[in-house]
Image (tube, rainbow, N blue to C red):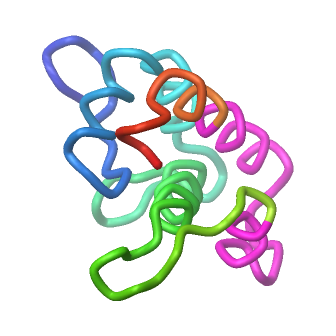
């Protein structure tokens, strides 16, 4: 976590990370809480991993000619075997909704 108490997120760009820290800290904090899945070696929760994957999917890779996806499509592609539980998916969706509303240009 940074000095402000908000978890550090890697959402695909520094602009998105900064906007998320400034505008979606409470949602990021809930999403970043370890659960029965624990955390990855990088310290990310399952919700954080899902949110990171979906965020990257939504952005796409313009330099490689890959268009960004849709939220339902990205959720499906980031959770193909439904490895994330309902709470993890719900908390990721809450964070992603905040990003969509608060950071539409920097996180899309």
On whether residue 19 falls in the magenta region, the answer is: no
* Left or right of residue 58: residue 14: left
Q: Main secondary structure of the magenta part?
A: helix
* Quadrant in the rendering for residue 4: top left
Residue pushed farthest left? Answer: 3
* Left or right of residue 24: residue 95: right
Coordinates of residue 79 in the picture (x, y in percent): 72, 73
Coordinates of residue 63 in the picture (x, y in percent): 27, 80
The residue shown at (62%, 45%) is 35
Of 102 and 80, nearer the camera is 102
The residue shown at (52%, 65%) is 53
The residue shown at (57%, 36%) is 31
Of 11 and 59, nearer the camera is 59
Coordinates of residue 28 in the picture (x, y in percent): 48, 30
Above or below, comparing residue 74 to residue 91 in the picture: below
Above or below, comparing residue 100 to residue 69 in the picture: above
* Quadrant in the rendering for residue 7: top left
The magenta stretch is 73-96
* Left or right of residue 103: residue 18: left
């Amino acid at each position: 976590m940074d000095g402000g108490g908000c978890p550090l997120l890697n959402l695909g760009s520094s602009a998105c990370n900064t906007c998320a820290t400034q505008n979606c800290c409470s949602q990021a904090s809930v999403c970043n809480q370890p659960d029965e899945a624990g955390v990855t070696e990088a310290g990310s929760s399952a919700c954080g991993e899902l949110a990171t994957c979906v965020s990257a999917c939504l952005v796409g890779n313009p330099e490689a000619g890959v268009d960004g996806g849709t939220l339902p499509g990205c959720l499906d592609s980031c959770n193909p075997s439904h490895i994330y539980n309902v709470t993890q998916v719900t908390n990721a969706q809450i964070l992603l909704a905040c990003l969509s509303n608060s950071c539409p240009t920097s996180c899309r």
